[in-house]
Image (cartoon, helix red, strand yellow):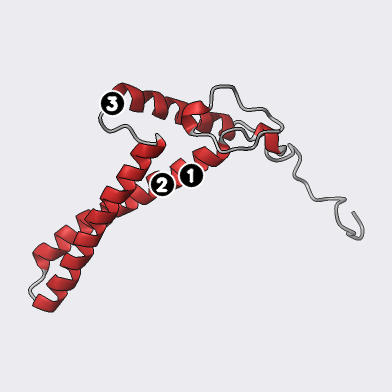
Amino acid sequence: MDITKKSINQIKRPMNNDYLEIENADGMPGLVDSTIALDFLLSVKSAIRNSAMALTEMADQEARKAVHSLLDNSINLHAELTDLMIKKGWLHPYDVNQQFQLDKVSTQTALQIASLQLFKGDTSRLGTFATPNY
């Protein structure tokens, strides 16, 4: 059984409904890693935008220095994270077609996950516990 990490670019086959078995979670570690990285990238972008707006509203020099430092650190983090995502194949900012294909695979996978039967149809708890007079 091969359980090595695969990038989301390598997910080709439809998801198996027996998702509890490790061999049927093919590509999930790569998908989770790329999703976390994308969420982190979006958070860093928000920090950059918010820091830049805050700088335009501040009069106190010490506060401006602190926020300016935060802005510089956020920009550097954005660059590092973007480089990592490009190297891993999770982001293709210079190739729209490749990014579209990646987004298409991510969307199909999200739809497959959403269609999984995670819970039994009958979620009634009657009879599950020792309940008198039922």
Disc 3: CA contacts within 10 A as few (<14), some (14-19) or many (>=20): few
Evaluate if marks 2 and 1 touch, with contact meaning CB atoms under 8 Å apart: yes
Q: Amino acid at mark 3?
A: Asp
Residue at 16% across / 66% down in the picture?
Answer: 68
Residue at 77% x, 46% y is 124
Q: Is residue 53 left or right of residue 129?
A: left
Residue at the disc numbered 3: 95
Task: State the image coordinates of residue 79 (x, y, percent, origin top left).
Answer: 26, 49
Q: Is disc 1 surrounded by few (<14), some (14 to 19) or many (20+) residues within 10 Å?
A: some
* C-alpha span from label 2 to label 1: 6 Å
User: Where in the figure is residue 46, as x and y percent of width and height?
Assistant: 27, 53
The Cα atoms of the two marked residues, 2 and 3, are separated by 19 Å
Is 18 situated above or below 128? above
Question: Residue 86 falls in which quadrant of the image?
Answer: top left
Amino acid marked by disc 1 = Asp
Q: Check disc 1 and report the residue beneath it.
A: 33
Front residue of this view, candidates 112 and 76: 76
Q: Quadrant of residue 52?
A: bottom left
Q: Position of residue 70 (x, y in %)?
A: 23, 65
Seen at 51% across and 39% down, the residue is 30
Q: Amino acid at mark 2?
A: Ala
